[in-house]
């Protein structure tokens, strides 16, 4: 009488992985280690160091003085950050929001087959994006100069008074907004065009056969089909709009305009880092605290944008 033996079952892949040591895969870990090393050096370490730096007072040369949370208390009580946030919001609403709407309309026009010389228009629109910001600032200073500006000369030629563009708060903000609009317009047009290029032409042809007009096609087909692109532009446009620095810095020669009218959040941070011509004491600890404040504002705005745009996408679908 022979005893029946049970066949051996092969261990599962999960059991095999558990039995093996971590050192078994040292070659694989070594292969992917450069990414994690670079991420730790250029990502985690600066983040941890910035958190530490915001708890000290330091001019970058002398001795660090621990101050605890005084820098964050100063951030919310001094009024400087609140004023910079207000300036940023005003410039954002007068520049970044209109440029996104205008770029969407221009992209819809360029994507039409009836428009001739489409490539020429795309090149002209995108040209400001690759133009030197210093050259752009010189051009705008020549256009809006109070005494010898081309625009004021044109106003005088038709019998109107000069406008103090760069010596008043509202005038400086308006010039900065126009400058941002002019530089950002082509970039957003290209983004929207790339989204519209993925829409099947058959949808437009079927809509035209049904008698739909251009506005109805744009509202019922183009907008729903490029909604992910609109969401991307809304989030990235908001983030870049609240990080405005170069335009007011170059246009006002680092002074921030009359009564600091164009001192944005990023401008204020760089000012306390000693990167502007404004004579304020350098305090890298307070500059780091401003950076954390900017980070919190951007995270909040990105979350609000994603939530609002997500709800509208569900309603549209």
Image (cartoon, helix red, strand yellow):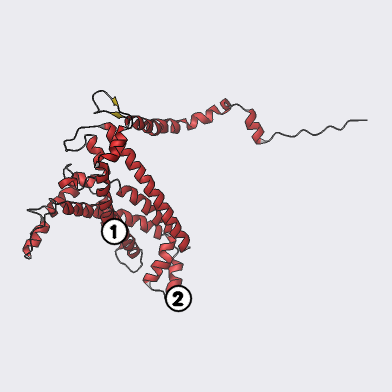
Instruction: Please state if 44 lies on the left or on the right of 179 as rendered.
Output: right
Q: Point out the residue furthest to the right here.
A: 1
* Secondary structure type for disc 2: loop
Residue occupying image coordinates x 34% and y 60%:
104
Image spot of residue 180 (x, y percent): 24, 52
To which quarter of the image does residue 196 belong?
bottom left
Which residue, given by chain and number where applicable, does mark 1 sit on?
Answer: 98
Front in this rendered view, residue 244 or 104:
244
* Secondary structure type for disc 1: helix
Residue occupying image coordinates x 44% and y 71%:
205
Please tell me the numbered disc located at residue 210. 2
To which quarter of the image does residue 80 belong?
top left
Disc 2 packing (10 Å; few <14; some 14–19; many ≥20): few
Residue occupying image coordinates x 30% and y 40%:
76
Instruction: Please state if 54 lies on the left or on the right of 205 as rendered.
Output: left
Instruction: Please state if 43 lies on the left or on the right of 253 as rendered.
Output: right
Mark 2 touching mark 1, by CB under 8 A? Answer: no
């Amino acid at each position: 009488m022979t005893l029946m033996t049970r066949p051996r079952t092969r261990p599962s892949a999960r059991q095999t992985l558990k039995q093996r040591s971590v050192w078994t895969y040292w070659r694989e870990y070594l292969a992917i280690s450069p990414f994690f090393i670079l991420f730790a050096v250029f990502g985690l370490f600066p983040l941890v160091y910035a958190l530490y730096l915001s708890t000290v007072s330091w001019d970058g040369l002398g001795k660090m003085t621990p101050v605890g949370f005084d820098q964050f208390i100063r951030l919310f009580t001094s009024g400087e950050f609140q004023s910079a946030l207000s300036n940023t919001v005003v410039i954002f609403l007068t520049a970044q929001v209109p440029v996104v709407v205008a770029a969407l309309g221009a992209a819809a026009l360029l994507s039409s087959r009836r428009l001739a010389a489409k490539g020429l228009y795309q090149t002209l629109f995108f040209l400001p994006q690759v133009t030197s910001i210093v050259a752009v600032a010189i051009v705008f200073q020549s256009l809006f100069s109070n005494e010898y500006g081309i625009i004021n000369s044109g106003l005088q030629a038709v019998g109107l008074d000069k406008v103090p563009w760069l010596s008043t708060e509202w005038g400086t903000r308006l010039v900065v907004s126009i400058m941002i609009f002019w530089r950002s317009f082509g970039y957003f047009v290209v983004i929207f065009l790339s989204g519209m290029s993925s829409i099947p032409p058959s949808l437009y042809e079927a809509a035209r056969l049904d008698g739909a007009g251009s506005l109805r096609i744009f509202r019922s087909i183009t907008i729903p089909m490029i909604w992910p692109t609109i969401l991307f532009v809304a989030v990235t446009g908001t983030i870049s709009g609240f990080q405005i620095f170069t335009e007011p810095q170059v246009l006002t020669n680092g002074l921030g305009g009359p009564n600091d009218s164009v001192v944005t959040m990023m401008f204020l941070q760089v000012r306390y880092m000693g990167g502007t011509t404004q004579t304020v004491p350098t305090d890298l600890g307070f500059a780091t605290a401003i950076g954390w404040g900017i980070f919190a504002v951007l995270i909040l705005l990105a979350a609000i944008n994603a939530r609002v745009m997500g709800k509208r996408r569900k309603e549209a679908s």
